[in-house]
């Protein structure tokens, strides 16, 4: 009932009043300038520090409140940093707030430049934050943008020969288990039973790659029983890597996030050749980290698992990484680099980003839009496009130099 209602509301909102991300040129610039060097402490500390500074400065430039969640790792010489940009909703600081979060990790494994994994996620996150803050809209609910560290972190510590940090999904573990409960308390985002009023997190993981050729998508058979309809559709289209995957658990509050994202995707007329495939995963009682990894491995390989283990709603958005096209060989490898940023894949990333913006605007309930920019208003709305001329000239120069 609740899910159905959200779909109706969202379709109406997105068709009437879209906040336009203003094209993919900015995405390309940010991805290739700031997230195309290995961001790993043993390989390029400079690139990692630069990425951290860039994220904080961008958040500040968008007028977000920038909060830092630093955390220890098992290596005394390495500290982890999560950055959370907050756009306060009108209900901020009350139990009526229903905060919603967009999250991506900005680190890489040591063996890759990580343009797709997960430079693409963080770039979409920044673009979405920029679009949502630059319209002059107010939101009923608080928007949170979380750039997290050490999603990877599976490298061995040379000195102790132990797994580095908390062996994967480390930044989101500290965010969910340590930082968020304190923040919910601080801002009174708790209901009368002391449960967070949090709507959930949309977790972006490796979202750039697309391949429209038949047989470019691997569909591991082990998960077919959970998603028979999805498998049938992918096979009918010739097993092409032509879709973004969006996953959440049946019957959980995060279904509203999944509804919002898929409805926003389908409401767009741009690039109709790219699809969204919705994976409704069964809810698993008493989920533990080990159970998840042993039984549902390919479905939980990102930060959404930390939310699920922490009892918070989250959905996962991914291009399926090593199951698609070039990423079958480039995953965690040197060729996850700028060659993946083609015009087509940037359009694909742009469509996902626009869907995220529309979904978040609907979930956070955007109200008043006052700013007018140089571009034309969206019909039927007092919201306006984000200026798409922004940066265009500079970007085309970069485009051509590649
Ligand atoms: C490290 O990253 C910086 C960008 O922050 C780049 O200029 C430099 O060339 C990189 N170094 C190596 C060894 O890749
Ligand atoms: C750990 O060992 C690898 C392989 O020998 C080396 O490339 C890397 O730099 C070492 N890391 C540290 C922190 O010493
Ligand atoms: C919560 O509030 C305390 C006291 O003001 C502050 O020290 C702490 O950093 C806040 N933590 C979060 C996660 O907001
Ligand atoms: C796309 O997939 C086809 C079929 O598997 C493969 O031959 C091709 O190299 C892939 N191209 C890219 C850019 O991933
Ligand atoms: C791709 O697969 C679809 C579905 O099986 C088929 O109809 C189509 O002819 C194939 N296209 C090519 C180019 O082989
Ligand atoms: C989950 O844990 C509860 C409490 O320990 C137990 O009663 C229940 O049977 C468990 N459910 C499953 C499916 O294991
Ligand atoms: C925001 O909240 C106000 C007051 O409850 C409500 O009237 C309005 O419809 C909400 N905005 C949206 C877009 O739902
Ligand atoms: C979907 C995906 O590729 N996620 C990867 C991000 O990095 C972690 C840690 O290496 C992998 O385990 C995930 O598979």
Image: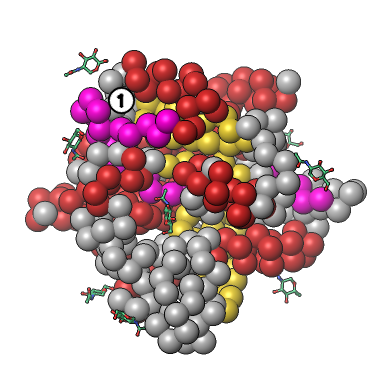
Q: Which residues are magenta?
A: 195-221
- Residue 116 lies, in percent from the top left, at 32, 51
- Residue 362 lies, in percent from the top left, at 59, 34
Residue 384: name its quadrant.
top left
- Residue 297 lies, in percent from the top left, at 50, 46
Up/down of 338 relative to 355, above or below = below
Left or right? Give the position of 88 relative to 346.
right
Kind of element beneath mark 1: loop
| Placement of the C terminus among the 4 image quadrants | bottom left
Q: Residue at x 54, y 77 (%)?
A: 73
Q: Residue at x 67, y 39 (%)?
A: 284
State ligand 7's quadrant.
top right
Mark 1: C-beta under 8 Å from nearest atom of ligand 5: yes
Left or right? Give the position of 211 relative to 75.
left
Q: Which residue is mark 1?
A: 239
Question: Taken as a whole, is the magenta stretch helix, strand or loop?
Answer: loop
Up/down of 275 relative to 173, above or below = above
Q: Is residue 392 visible?
A: no
Left or right? Give the position of 203 relative to 366.
left
Q: Nearer the viewer, residue 184 or 230?
A: 230
Q: Callout 1: 10 Å neighbours few (<14), some, many (20+)?
A: many
Q: Nearer the viewer, residue 7 or 364?
A: 7
| Placement of the N terminus among the 4 image quadrants | top right
Q: Is residue 173 visible?
A: yes
Q: Residue at x 42, y 30 (%)?
A: 221
């Amino acid at each position: 009932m609740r899910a159905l209602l959200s779909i109706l509301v969202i379709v109406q909102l997105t068709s009437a009043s879209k906040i336009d991300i203003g094209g993919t040129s900015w995405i390309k610039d940010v991805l290739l300038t700031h997230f195309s060097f290995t961001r790993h402490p043993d390989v390029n500390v400079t690139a990692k520090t630069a990425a951290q500074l860039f994220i904080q400065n961008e958040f500040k430039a968008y007028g977000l409140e920038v909060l830092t969640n630093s955390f220890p790792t098992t290596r005394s010489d390495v500290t982890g940093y999560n950055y959370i940009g907050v756009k306060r909703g009108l209900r901020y600081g009350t139990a009526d707030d229903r905060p919603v979060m967009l999250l991506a990790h900005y680190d890489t494994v040591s063996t890759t430049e990580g343009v797709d994994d997960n430079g693409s996620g963080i770039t979409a996150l920044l673009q979405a934050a920029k679009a949502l803050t630059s319209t002059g809209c107010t939101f009923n609910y608080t928007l949170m943008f979380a750039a997290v560290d050490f999603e990877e972190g599976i490298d061995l510590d040379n000195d102790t020969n132990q797994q580095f940090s908390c062996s994967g999904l480390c930044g989101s573990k500290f965010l969910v288990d340590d930082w968020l409960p304190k923040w919910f308390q601080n801002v009174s985002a708790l209901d009368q039973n002391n449960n967070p009023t949090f709507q959930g997190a949309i977790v972006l993981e490796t979202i750039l790659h697309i391949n429209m050729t038949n047989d470019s998508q691997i569909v591991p058979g082990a998960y077919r029983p959970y998603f028979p309809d999805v498998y049938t559709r992918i096979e009918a289209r010739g097993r092409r890597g032509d879709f973004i995957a969006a996953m959440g658990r049946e019957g959980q509050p995060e279904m509203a996030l999944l509804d919002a994202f898929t409805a926003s995707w389908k409401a767009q007329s741009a690039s109709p050749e790219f699809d969204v495939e919705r994976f409704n995963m069964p809810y698993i009682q008493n989920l533990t980290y080990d159970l998840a990894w042993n039984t549902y491995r390919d479905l939980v390989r990102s930060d959404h698992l930390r939310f699920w283990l922490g009892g918070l709603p989250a959905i996962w958005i991914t291009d399926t990484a090593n199951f698609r096209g070039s990423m079958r060989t480039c995953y965690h490898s040197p060729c996850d680099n700028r060659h993946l940023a083609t015009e087509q894949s940037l359009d694909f990333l742009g469509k996902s980003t626009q869907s995220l913006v529309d979904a978040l605007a609907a979930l956070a309930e955007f109200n008043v839009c006052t700013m007018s920019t140089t571009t034309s208003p969206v019909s039927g709305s007092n919201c306006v496009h984000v200026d798409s001329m922004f940066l265009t000239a500079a970007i085309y120069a970069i485009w051509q130099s590649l």
